[in-house]
């Protein structure tokens, strides 16, 4: 049975055409549109990387949603929300922006392919910013679909920060995994999260961690997992085999992938009702 009248929040590190060239960007572009066209509501979010041309893509600030300050690593950071329409689709994408974290003219690494040392904080700001904005919209998603390591803190925030919030209390989290090369995150990440009030026992696997460790951490708190790439790293494959939760196989063709997701989401929601 296909999904109908559901509210699906898509949170992705990359979305075509704003960031191009990855399977993740294509999937995070095509799936929400297909879900919308099947009679569901969608909201779509990604980071406003400095490499995105605001003029070409006609981004503009949403004043009524901007203006919040988020505290990351004990420091205030202003949250700016921008929006753009996706060409040839009745779909908008919201962008999480901040002068310090997203002004640089790159996404997650510099011209020499050095991974930015503050990428952990950028991911924290992005994930918190998405959830705070969804609350401000007064919108309660049935499914939260995450793509990419930069969305890896969404399950933690939903389960342990906004766990009493009515916007998220019934939401099911589905995490899509892609063949991403593991990159190191700041070893002080657990301390930064402890400042936000998270229990230290919860964070024990995040010290000296990589983006792959963060994905495993996120998978553990999600309700279901999707294989977004045909092949994943050995360590990730091993972790998936140990999961006691639904896993959707990889689907290469866009039409097949959409139909499989619609059925999968419906199944995840029905499981919650049992």
Image (cartoon, rainbow, N blue to C red):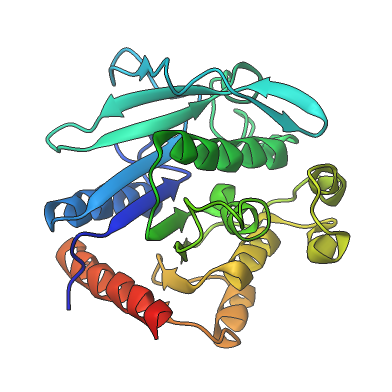
Q: Is residue 77 visible?
A: yes
Front-most of 203 and 68? 68
| Figure check: 106 above or below 114 | above
Tell me what residue is drawn at x 40 percent, y 50 percent.
140
Q: Position of residue 178 (x, y in %)?
A: 47, 61
| Figure check: 191 above or below 181 | above
Picture quarter with the C terminus = bottom left
Q: Position of residue 65 (x, y in %)?
A: 45, 23
| Figure check: 180 above or below 220 | above
Tell me what residue is drawn at x 43 percent, y 42 percent.
14
Tell me what residue is drawn at x 70 percent, y 42 percent.
120
Q: Position of residue 158 (x, y in %)?
A: 58, 55
Q: Position of residue 44 (x, y in %)?
A: 35, 42
Q: Seen in the image, is 22 located left or right of residue 37?
A: right
Q: Seen in the image, is 145 located left or right of residue 109?
A: left
Front-most of 221 and 24? 221
């Amino acid at each position: 049975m296909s999904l109908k009248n559901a509210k699906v929040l898509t949170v992705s590190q990359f979305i075509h055409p704003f960031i191009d060239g990855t399977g993740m960007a294509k999937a995070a572009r095509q799936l929400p549109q297909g879900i919308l066209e099947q009679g569901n509501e969608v909201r779509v979010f990604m980071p406003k990387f400095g490499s995105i041309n605001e003029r070409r893509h006609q981004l503009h600030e949403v004043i009524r949603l901007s203006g919040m300050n988020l505290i990351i690593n004990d420091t205030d950071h202003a949250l700016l929300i921008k929006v753009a329409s996706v060409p040839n689709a009745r779909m908008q994408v919201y962008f999480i922006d901040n002068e310090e974290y997203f002004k640089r003219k790159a996404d997650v690494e510099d011209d020499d392919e050095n991974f930015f040392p503050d990428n952990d904080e950028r991911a924290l700001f992005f994930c918190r910013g998405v959830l705070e904005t969804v609350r401000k919209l007064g919108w309660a998603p049935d499914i939260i679909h995450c793509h990419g390591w930069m969305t890896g803190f969404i399950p933690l925030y939903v389960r342990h920060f906004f766990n009493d919030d009515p916007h998220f209390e019934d939401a099911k989290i589905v995490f899509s995994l892609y063949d991403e090369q593991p990159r190191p995150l700041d070893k002080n990440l657990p301390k930064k999260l402890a400042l936000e009030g998270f229990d230290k026992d919860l964070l024990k696997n995040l010290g000296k961690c990589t983006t792959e460790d963060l994905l495993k951490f996120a998978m553990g708190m999600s309700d279901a997992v999707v294989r977004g790439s045909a092949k994943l790293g050995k360590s990730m494959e091993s972790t998936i085999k140990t999961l006691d939760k639904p896993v959707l196989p990889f689907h290469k063709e866009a039409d097949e992938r959409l139909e499989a997701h619609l059925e999968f989401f419906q199944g995840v929601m029905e499981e919650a009702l049992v």
